[in-house]
Image: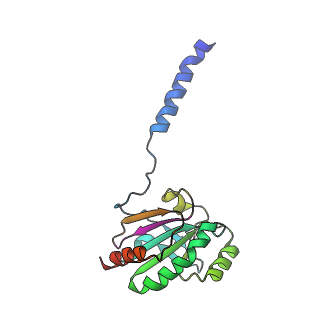
Amino acid sequence: MLRAALPRLLSLCLCLAALSCSEGPAKPTIGEPAPDFALSALDDSRYRLSELRGKVVFVNLWATWCPPCRHEMPSMVRLYDLLRDEGLEILAVSEDNDEDALRRFVQSYGVNFPVLRDENKKVYNLYMATGVPETHLIDKRGKLVSSIIGPFDWTSPEVVARVRELLRQ
C-alpha cells in the first residue's frame, strides 16, 4: 500500500517544493520606483501616488487602534505644518474599517493631511508591510528613498534636514 502511494507522495512533495521556491511579489526596494496605488480619502477625493510626482511623499501605514501610531501622529502633523509649503505631501493610509472611529481620530489629533482608507489592506499588501506604523519616503521622481518600521519622531532635526534635502533636489 505504501509502495502504491509513494509516487503520488513524491509528486506532491515536488509540487510543494516548486511552490515554495516560486517568486511572488518582492518587497519594494530602496532606489526603485515606489509601488503605485489609488485610494479614496475621508473627504471622498481620490489620490494616486503617481500623480504626486514632483513632490516628496511620505506614505504612512497606520490604524487608529495602534498605540505607536497614535504616539507618532502629532509629530507627523507638525512635520506637515513645517514642510507642506515646500512641497511635502503626507498620505496617511489607514487600514481601519470603522469610518466613524477614523473621523473621530482625525479630528481629535488635528490631522491636516489626506487620510486614505485602505480597508482591504491593498497598500499594506502592496508594500508588504510587517505591521503598523510603517512609513515610506518617496522622492520627487517617485523612487522609494527609505522605509521605517515602527513609530518615529518625524520632527527630529535629522529627519527635517533629510526631507528638506529631498525637497531641494
> Quarter holding the C terminus?
bottom left
Q: Quadrant of residue 138?
A: bottom left
On screen, residue 58 above or below 8: below
Residue at the extreme bottom of the image, as rendered: 85
Q: Quadrant of residue 96?
A: bottom right
Q: Which residues are magenta?
A: 133-140
Residue 88 image point, x, y percent: 42, 79
> Quarter holding the N terminus?
top right
Residue at the extreme front of the image, as rendered: 157
State the residue in front, 81 or 104. 81
Residue 49 image point, x, y percent: 44, 71
Q: Residue at x 60, y 77 (%)?
A: 42
Tell me, yes or no, whether the highlighted magenta stretch contains residue 24. no
Tell me, yes or no, whether the highlighted magenta stretch contains residue 135. yes
Q: Main secondary structure of the magenta part?
A: strand
Query: In the drawing, does residue 155 fall left or right of residue 98?
Result: left
